[in-house]
Image: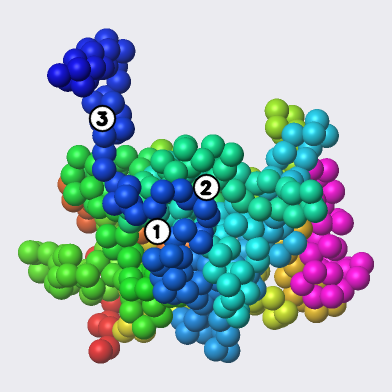
Amino acid sequence: MKRYWVHLLLVVLAAAFGFTATLLYAQDKTYSHTDYFEHYEGTKTCLTCHQKEAENFFNSQHYQWKGDAPQIINSNKQKLGKMNTFNDFCTSPRGNWIGFVKNSRGDVVSKGCSACHAGKGQLPVDTISKTQVENIDCLMCHASGYRRDLYQNDKGEYEWKPILWKNQEGLDSVAKRISSPTRVMCLRCHSASGGGPNFKRGDVEYTLADPTRDFDVHMATAGKNMQCVTCHAGKDHRVLGRGTDLSGSDTPDKQLTCDSTACHGSPPHKLAVLNKHAESVNCTVCHIPKFARAEATDMIRDWSKPTYNAETDKYSATITLQKDVEPVYAWYNGFTRAQLPGESATRLADGSVGIMTPQGSREDVKAKIFAFKLHKGRLPLLTAKDWLIPITVEHFFSNGQIDPAVKSAAKEIYGIDNANYTWVDTTRYMGIFHGVQPKEQALKCMDCHGPKGRMDWKALGYKGNPMTVKPPPRLK
């Protein structure tokens, strides 16, 4: 009876102060691991029951940050990923892995790329060991409300630890809130990548944690309420799906498409004219008219022009952000050409170096038109070799000196001292797949085929608007 009156009082207070019943009763929720252990003592507690799962995760892309890359046409059967390639955002984890970077005021402005690695701070290696398995941070993806921070011990070694590591009771409570990864857990890293909210992907916004149906028909909380793992979960910690600009894949032999999971089937529409379009046009083209609708995304990042932020006392590249961006469109057959380290730069038609370029054309019957974010960058190019150079950005953030940051990376990646380099424009195509809007808001015929339509028909291999200039049939 006493418990009843306590809860009644809480409900009255909630009505008065605008709290939700969900939050009030969260303390009574029973989690799956509530009675499985008494005290959380790090990953070894999880390994008591989940040794095999940890070993599977060790071999996954989420831990190794690289994987099989048969969809990269120039991979030469290498395993590729963040660890041995580079990008046009923060460029590379190598030389930027872990540590405190402080500004002139002594404030920490960066802690390294490992902040979003599902490990406790050690670099992943290819050979499994007890040390590497115990480096896995299971709570990062499986514990609701888990938070961690970077700490340095007396030996100067860095480690990511739960912020409650000195509060055993609080840590035990959080460590028992075990579930499959939720949208919030996934967005911790996938929306924050690239240096800011939605900076990198463009279609992975924090809004997806609790979106309306108008924002995303699949993940709308008051709708289907699909989690990221609804589509992306595979077996043995192998994630399904590969973005057009990602190197490695956990499941290279299985593509993730709108009909591959028996969600929409094939053909997807009732109208024949729409199904005819679907033979050569990917679903995303019509059903994601714009991206970066709530949070601006990074469209241009120029590392040759340092920018200083007086408020944070931190330097960055010159970044151009945009909201409500219309995608660009290109043919894509599932294969990509990557610009890899130690490989002569490949120029596109506009003279820029193609960091990630989708393969395919109208003549390729396996290709469809896809929606892309077209990211432009400016990166250093090794003069003698015509190789792109990443940047040791952790040094650069604190002092804005780009030259030593480039030369440090050239030494780290290529073993070249005092490298001579120039600056070159780069281009990356990034697939747009999230933020599917209700069908009523899908593109209409004239959005593409009208006088001011969004398609560049000639770039797509047509002689003109196919509504007025009938193209030859695609051969099968």
Quarter of the image containing the N terminus?
top left
Mark 3: few, some, or many residues within 10 Å (few <14, many ≥20)?
few
Cβ atoms under marks 2 and 1 closer than 8 Å: no
* Observer-nearest of 375 and 57: 57
Residue 175: % across, % down: 43, 47
Which label's residue is closer to the chain start, 2 or 3? 3
The residue depicted at 29 percent of the width and 51 percent of the height is: 32
Query: Please, what is the three-letter code of the amino acid marked with disc 3?
Result: Tyr
Give the vertical position of 73 relative to 204 (above or below): below
Residue 131: % across, % down: 61, 69
The residue depicted at 16 percent of the width and 65 percent of the height is: 264
Q: CA distance from mark 2 to mark 1?
A: 17 Å
SS assignment at label 1: loop
SS assignment at label 2: loop
SS assignment at label 3: helix
Q: Is residue 399 magenta?
A: yes
Per the image, the residue denoted by label 2 is 192
Magenta highlight range = 395-422
Residue 9: % across, % down: 23, 13
Q: Which of the numbered marks, if any, corresponds to residue 432?
A: 1
* Observer-nearest of 27 and 233: 27
The quarter of the picture where residue 229 lies is bottom left
Q: Is 308 displayed left or right of 91 in the figure? A: right
Query: Please, what is the three-letter code of the amino acid marked with disc 2?
Result: Ala
Quarter of the image containing the C terminus?
bottom left
Q: Which of the numbered marks, if any, corresponds to residue 25?
A: 3
